[in-house]
Amino acid sequence: MSWLSWLLTLWPCSAPSVLLVGLVGRQLGLRVGLQVVQTVRCSRWGTSSVQGLFQDGDVVIGGLFSLYYQPPAIDHDFTQLPHYKSCTGFENLPLQYIYGMVFALEEINHSTTLLPGVKLGYHIHDSCQLPLWALQAALSLVGGDSTSCDRPVPLIIGGDSSTTAQILCRILGPLSVPLMSYTATCPCLSDRRQFPNFFRTIPSDTYQARAMAQLAIRFNWTWIGAVVANNDYGLMAIKIFQEETQEAGVCLAFVETLSRENTVNDARQAALTIQASTARVILIFTWYTDVRELFLQLMKINVSDRQFLASEAWSTSGDLFQNPSTSKVASGVLGVAIRSSAITGFENYLRNLNPSRRPDDKFLREFWENMFGCSPGGTESLERVDNLFTDTSQLRLTYNTYLAVYAAAHALHSLLSCPNSNSPPGNNSSTCLSPKHIKPIEVLQHLNKVNFTTPQGEMFYFQGADIPAKYDLVNWQNTPEGTLKLVLIGHMDGFDLLLNESAIQWSTGSNQVPLSVCSESCPPGTRMATRKGEPVCCFDCIPCAEGEISNTTGSPHCKRCPLEFWSNAKRTVCIPRQLDFLSFNETLGITLTTVAVSGAMVTTAVFVVFLYHRQTPMVRANNSELSFLLLVSLKLCFLCSLVFIGRPSVWACRFQQAAFGISFVLCVSCLQVKTIVVLAAFRSARPGAEALMKWFGPGQQRGSVCFFTCIQVIICIIWLTISPPVPQPDFDIPGLKVTLKCAMASVVGFSLVLGYIGLLACTCLLLAFLARKLPDNFNEAKLITFSMLIFCAVWVAFVPAYVSSTGKYTVAVEIFAILASSYGLLFCIFAPKCFIILLRPERNTKKHLMSR
């Protein structure tokens, strides 16, 4: 027997039925011949389509609900038609959904504004949570029931699961029959290309996953564990959650899946993972039966300090928060719930239901027998009965069913309204569409355009297959009796999260938001450094480098301070950098000043000694005029070093280099002329060279010194005119203190000044070296040679030291070179002379000086 032949047994054989079978076969990819269709025996599969709730009307709306939760057993004998027993496990809450639909239809039938003159009927079937039974009932509804000659319904409210909704939509799609679900939440059903005939009054799971993500971001939970159903519901939700929280730095510590076929083992494994993880917030996207088993497993291992985030599938499950065995684990649950709304008059309607007034209502009869343990007919009443059926304090899926009926009614109202006329629907005008001739595709077209205000005052419209997302945010809180109660603590409207944080009772029992992070947030002054091989939420806190700051908690990087600022000791704020320079008040400045002043005083003392003994041979024999000029230039060299100390200014920067360059050129020029005179004097003693000394008389000596010095003066004038040194902070050197120095705008000018001094010094050293062995008891060329060796050594060492030093120590190096070379010249040239003048006056004679 073929599968298609089996499908044909699901409804009576009629012309519409044959057409529907062909459509079903095409959707299922089956190829059958017309002969097979015609020869198939007609019968019913089970009794589901017979048992139901029926009310005739001008327009009949179909309804599919899962009133039972235990599917029937099947006898797999493929030689005959499959035989099913009846479903068991009657549930009270789905019965409330059914009467929510009936109440809405009766309310509309009594309305004078919505579909006046048109009576709405209903054909409601139970699918027992079986997609194939739902398919049988749906095909029976849209094909017409031959047992009662009912007209095909143009619209069906139902599809209790996403799987059932997908199957029904694919089968009913070619017939353009709209299917409006109150529970199917799979995001896949929003695809209008695949499911153009699908609508729903419950938001897509995409939105509740986004709501969960917003809660995690709002409470700074960056380390979250997840337990999800091992199907599209759980896996799709966790994927969306990750996408929404990725940029906010939220990481999943683990993802455990629960399968219906292995719930106990999977729940035990998930409980152990939760116990071992450092995540304190656990996200759960699965059914309430799975959660119940998970909570039982957590109770066994005494894990009761986790904060759970609940999806709408279990966030309002009374079976969980009213269960004493799991209340310890479940305390503080924060969940997203299907939004609830009050339906005026619905509670009275439910409590006034009685099978005696509805003899054909088999659903109500079974409920009554389960409730009161007897057949209807006595004095039983629902007035004082409190259970899930009569509880209207939080109508969620019931309200979704109620909205679906009103959406269908408004689509029909728009469809049946007379064009270009004020005539209401249902009148007999020839220009108006008759309710008996309604086509499903017309209802589908008008459903896409519905826009109305509900009796509760809310705007209702479809965005494709979906409605604007609205959720309740609920919290499971402890009561004085030791049980848990469901408390509304906020709403989710679209992307707007409205939350009363002060009303939340967390799993810890306090109002303090629990902390769930892999690593504590880095304090200001540090930055996050991700650990290799671990999620981005797990990191170390690294102090900011010098000159960088982070002034916020959890900063991913440090910011560099502007040039004029530097980081404080804690690296939390940029503070203005302090100007630093070599001052007269610090130890180094005082030391250099003392050495410079001492050198100037010693030079002055030598000058006084030479002046006092100017008539002695020692002074006169060594060209006393050049000696006095040399002493003056040395004193200027000592004093010019003082110009380098103190706060640099525009004129100080210009004067210090000029004073330094000119003073040393004057000094070296004097030594060079003295050396030339010594050489000339000895050369003139040779026969035929008497006229040589006339070129080196006192005038020529003074002129030579002046000439050599003027060259340096010209170099300094050009340098300081074109590109003089200027005071400028040296921001290139790191640190809170920034050196205020005389920046060399032109390195060429400074190099020429030093180069000219070096040229004269080398020339003087060469000449003095040539004259060092001239026959004389006191040959001054020897002293000049030693002094110039020291001078050149100091300035050769100065260049690399000057280049490598930083800050104010650059200035100190230059001052040290000036003082060292000045002291070298002073002591090498004048110390031996002063020794003879002051301590060995017997040697201060012409005879002694001229002897070999």
Image (spheres, rainbow, N blue to C red):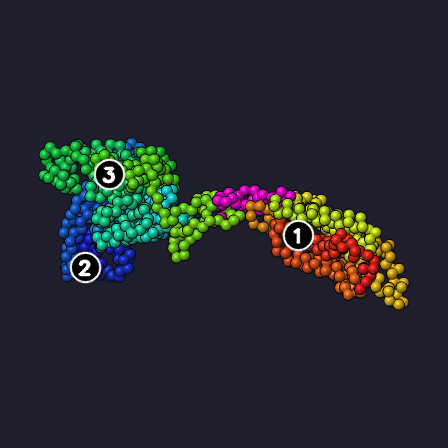
Say left or right for 726 vs 476: right
Dot 2: within a 10 Å radius of its alpha carbon, few (fewer than 14), some, or many (20 or more) residues? few
Residue nearest the viewer, comparing 212 with 351: 212
Q: Magenta stretch: dominant SS?
A: loop
Disc number lying in front (1 or 2): 1
The image shows a total of numbered marks equal to 3
Magenta-drawn stretch contains 564:
yes
Residue 816's disc is 1
Determine which residue is flagged by label 2: 39
As helix, strand or loop, the secondary structure at mark 1 comes to helix
Determine which residue is flagged by label 3: 484
Say if residue 722 shows up in the picture: no
Query: Vertically, is 337 above or below 173?
Result: above
Q: Residue at x 11, y 32 (%)?
A: 379
To which quarter of the image does residue 342 belong? top left
The residue sitting at the bottom extreme is 687
Disc number lying in front (3 or 1): 1
Q: Which residue is drawn at 74% across and 48% down?
A: 605
Whole-number angstrom distance, CA of label 1 to CA of label 2:
119 Å
Residue 241 x %, y %: 36, 49
> Disc 1 residue type?
Phe
Say which label, 3 or 1, has the lower sequence index.
3
Q: What stretch is highlighted in magenta?
A: 558-585
To which quarter of the image does residue 820 belong? bottom right
Residue 136 x %, y %: 22, 51
Residue 125's disc is none
